[in-house]
Amino acid sequence: MAAKDDLIKRFKAAKFLLLGGSAGSFKLLFRMVKMFPHDFKKTVIIVIHRKKNFFSEIEKLFAENSRMLIREISDKDPIDSNAIYIAPANYHTLVEKGGYFSLDVSESVWYSKPSIDVTFESVADSYGKDCAAILFSGANQDGANGLLKLRQSGALTIAQNPEDAEMSEMPGAAIGIDAAEYILHTTEIFELLQNST
C-alpha cells in the first residue's frame, strides 16, 4: 500500500506527463486524453510513432474528445502548464530549458521520427525530477533509453506491463534495462489516473 500511495503522490506532483507509444498504443492514448480533466494542471506531451500523412487527423480526433487544450507542436512554441502537446510527424521534438519546444530534422531513431527517446532524453535534461513518464505498446525499442535517462534524473517512470500490451517489445525493452520504476497493467494505469485527478 505504501508503494501505491507513493506512486499516486509522485504522479500528482509531476508537472510534466510524458506518454510514448507506437503500434498498439493509439487506443490507450486516446482513452487517456478523454479522461484528463480540463484543469489537469500538467503539461502532457504525447509522442506516438507516425509516418508522413499517417494519422493526419490525430490532433482533430483528440481535440474533439478532450477537455484540455490540444495542439500539434510547432518550433519555438512556448510550453503551457495545462495543455496536451502532440509531437508532429517528420521531426524530433525537443524540450528546452527556457520553457519552449524546438523541432529537429536529424535522422530517424529506431526508424522513427518523431522518436520517443529523443523527446524523453531532452525532457530528462531539462525537467527530469518534475516528470512522470509512461511507455506503452510498441514494436521496437524506442523509448527505453529515454525512459532510463528520465529515471536516472529523478522522474517517475512507468512501463505498460508487456503481458497486456498489444506489442510487447517497447515496454519490454524498457523493463529489460531497468528503466521502469513501476510496471503496471493497463487497468492500473487508468486507476492511477483516476486517483490522481
Image: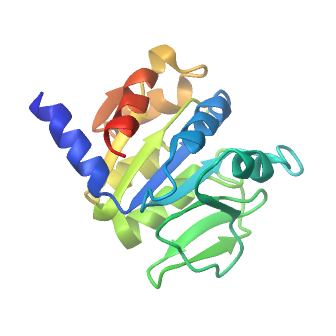
Please name the residue shown 23% across and 40% down the image: 7
Q: Position of residue 66 (x, y in %)?
A: 63, 49
Residue 172 figure quarter = top left
The colour style of the image is rainbow
Residue 112 in sight here: no
Which one is nearer the viewer's eye here, 133 or 10? Answer: 10
- Outermost residue on the top side: it is 163
Counting the numbered discs, the total is: 0
Residue 70 figure quarter = bottom right
Please name the residue shown 37% across and 46% down the image: 197
85 lies left or right of 57: left
- Outermost residue on the left side: it is 2
Instruction: Locate the N terminus and report the quarter of the image it occupies.
Output: top left
143 lies left or right of 106: left
Please name the residue shown 52% across and 47% down the image: 19
Residue 92 in sight here: yes
Which one is nearer the viewer's eye here, 189 or 135? Answer: 189
Q: Position of residue 111 (x, y in %)?
A: 72, 45
Q: Position of residue 79 (x, y in %)?
A: 53, 75
Please name the residue shown 52% across and 56% down the image: 38
Residue 107 figure quarter = bottom right
24 lies left or right of 179: right
Which one is nearer the viewer's eye here, 31 or 20? Answer: 31
- Residue 24 versus residue 111 in the image, above or below: above
Q: Position of residue 36 (x, y in %)?
A: 50, 47
- Outermost residue on the right side: it is 53
Which one is nearer the viewer's eye here, 122 or 197? Answer: 197
